[in-house]
Image (cartoon, rainbow, N blue to C red):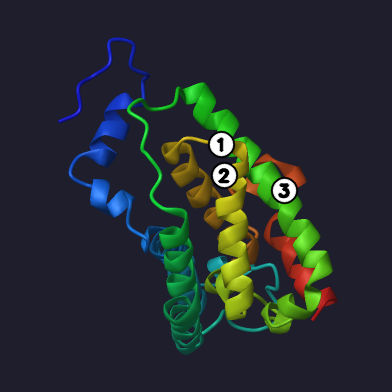
Amino acid sequence: MLVPHPEAPVLQGLWEAVQAGQREVLHSPYLPASYAFLTHVLLCTPFLALDALGSVCQRVRSWRVSAGSGPPPSLRRWGECFLRVLSRYLSSVLPATALLHALCGPVELPLLAPSCWDLCVEVFACLLVFDTLFFICHVAMHWIHRHHHRHHLPFALAAQDSSSLELLSLLLLALSSSWLVGCHPLSEAVFHLLNSWLAVEDHCGYDLPWALHHLLPCLGGAPCHQAHHALHN
């Protein structure tokens, strides 16, 4: 049982709830790949609903970046994409990251949670490091990334419809980013969640009024990323 620290941060209760009875899960060699896949699929579900509605609702279709280029991706296309991503995770990403975890050994979990400020700084630093590493790898190994660019008009789930090698390298880049920053496991979980959401939103195919790129224009968002796919297809 975890004993509260007299100067415990605001997030201490959350961190203790995450650890309570879940230490084996947190030390599992299958956690990184499972977390990456499940969060990606869950974050895609709102856009699956939008694509389904888009086939019958003109208002939803008007939000699409390519509003006049045809209907949204069909449920069949979503299903085929899901099976491709799942098979690559099961055949490559999951065993490779599990092997890496076994070689490196488990990480000791800290007793205290990070402060809210530390969490925000660590997540922001992880995003900067990951974006820098990803840009370098994207330019250096575009022959690997070209498989992903066969989606001339991307959709949310297609954010991870890449080759097994690229999926594995992306996860390793994300894990390396959090390791280089030296962030708390709670900060790392938030970073992976936010990083996955940014990828999903970039590929969703919708220019939604509340999208992050309208709040932070520097992000580019779905319109810029769809132009990138069209240019380098």
Q: Quadrant of the N terminus?
A: top left
Left/right placement of residue 194 relative to residue 41 reads right
Left/right placement of residue 154 relative to residue 60 reads right
Residue furthest to the left: 1
- Tag 3 near tag 1, CB within 8 Å: no
Quarter of the rendering containing residue 32: bottom left
Residue holding disc 1: 182
Name the residue: 83% across, 66% down: 139
- Tag 2 near tag 3, CB within 8 Å: no
Left/right placement of residue 110 relative to residue 36 reads left
Residue furthest to the top: 6
| Placement of 113 over or under 187, stated as above or below | above
Residue type of the residue flagged with mark 2: Trp
Name the residue: 38% across, 49% down: 106
Compute the Cα span from label 3 to label 1. 25 Å
| x and y percentages locating residue 212 in the rendered image | 62, 47
Disc 1 secondary structure class: loop
| x and y percentages locating residue 89 in the rendered image | 46, 76
The tag earlier along the polypeptide, 2 or 3, is 2
- Tag 2 near tag 1, CB within 8 Å: yes
Residue type of the residue flagged with mark 1: Gly
Residue holding disc 3: 219
**One can see residue 181 in this view:** yes
Disc 3 secondary structure class: helix
Q: Quadrant of the C terminus?
A: bottom right
Left/right placement of residue 62 relative to residue 90 reads right
Residue type of the residue flagged with mark 3: Leu
Residue neighbourhood size for the residue with mark 3, other residues' Cα within 10 Å, grouped as few (<14), some (14–19), many (≥20)? some
| Placement of 38 over or under 188, stated as above or below | below
Name the residue: 27% across, 27% down: 13
Residue holding disc 2: 179
